[in-house]
Amino acid sequence: MPRRTATSSVCYPILGLVFLVAAVGACANGTDKPASTIAKVSTTLPPPPPSAPLTGLPGGPGVDLERRPLAVKIDNSPGAQPQAGLDHADLVYEEVVEGGMTRFMAVFQSEDADPIGPVRSVRPVDIDLARWLTDPVLVFSGGAGVVIEEVRRSGLTWLDEDSGVLRDDPDRRAPHDLLTATPAIYAALAGAVQGPPPDLAGFDEAPPAGVTAGQVTIAFSDTETVTWTRVADSGRWVRLRNGSPQTLVGGAPVEVANLVVQTVRMVPTGIVDVAGNPTPGWDVVGSGRVVVVRDGVALEGTWSRDNASVPIRLTDATGADISLRPGETWWSLLPEGRSVTLG
């Protein structure tokens, strides 16, 4: 324990090496009271971590948020379930395909995922859904010949079953047995020009004013109905398909922070599948009705888009932009004449 110094008005010689700053200061001031040093504490806060353009959240561990987005086509038929990787997607588009079923295009940018799938075929609308992402990579397995030709002419970077980024899952039956992974896709793109997508929308933690909603039911067709139920504790939305919970590989539920239901007009493609069902096309350029659901609030507004190279803008009845909650977004393309019901 240090020795106390007696109070004195006289400075006495100090024997030995003079190295104590306190003693020198005491002689200079006519007192032997130790001089004190006050360390300055910086009040400057470090800058917040960068946020991902499609979620408004920080990216996953080691992820470069300047990398290009990956748009992967994922099957949603009964034989394809449970799917893998959807819980790591920033954005998932759901579109109606042949026979009234739906299929997904999952966009990965801020997190890595392994495995992802099952990977399935491309559709005409996928080109216009992906184009606004600036420098996307479209990943799929197969498709009608005319659609593949459209993809080739689109200028998009694309990878299919011949690219080496898809692998077989021995536990699944064809055609639901192809999986991929973001590390494999980015490795195949090594050296290719890359760039992040634009911001999906404005993100805001505070929910806007709107209609209270705890459940959202989307009737895509006579055979495909999806219900999203809000989890009170987290404010997130959990998916049920035709009345049954939809889960992923490992048993995790399909859940997201935001729901966007965009009403779209069907356009003929002239394409039919092997069973004779026509392949619908969807017009995602122009404007129409939209319902945006986040937290426990639903807002009805308008979607608008001048061309396929720009993001879709979401506005409320006053013309103001609708913000999304930071987190993942599930974007449903609802055919005109079909219903979305709030509960």
Image (tube, rainbow, N blue to C red):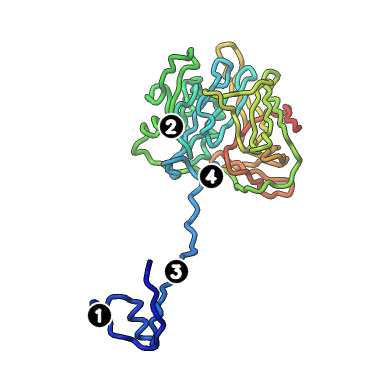
N-term mark: 1 or 2: 1
Three-letter amino acid code at the position of disc 2 = Thr
Task: Indicate which disc, 2 or 3, sits on the residue closer to the N terminus.
Answer: 3
Q: Position of residue 118 (x, y in %)?
A: 50, 21
- Disc 1 marks a residue whose amino acid type is Leu
| Residue type pointed to by label 4 | Leu
Q: Nearer the observer, disc 4 or disc 2? A: 4
Mark drawn on residue 57: 4
- Cα separation, mark 1 vs mark 3, equals 34 Å
Q: Quadrant of the C terminus?
A: top right
Instruction: Name the mark on residue 40.
Output: 3
Q: CA distance from mark 4 to mark 2?
A: 19 Å
Q: Secondary structure at mark 3?
A: loop
Residue farthest left in this picture: 16
Alpha-carbon distance for marks 4 and 3?
A: 33 Å
Q: How many C-alpha atoms fall within 10 Å of the one at disc 1: few (<14), some, or many (≥20)?
A: few
Residue at which label 2 appears: 182
Apparent side of residue 247 relative to residue 155 in the rendered image (left or right):
right
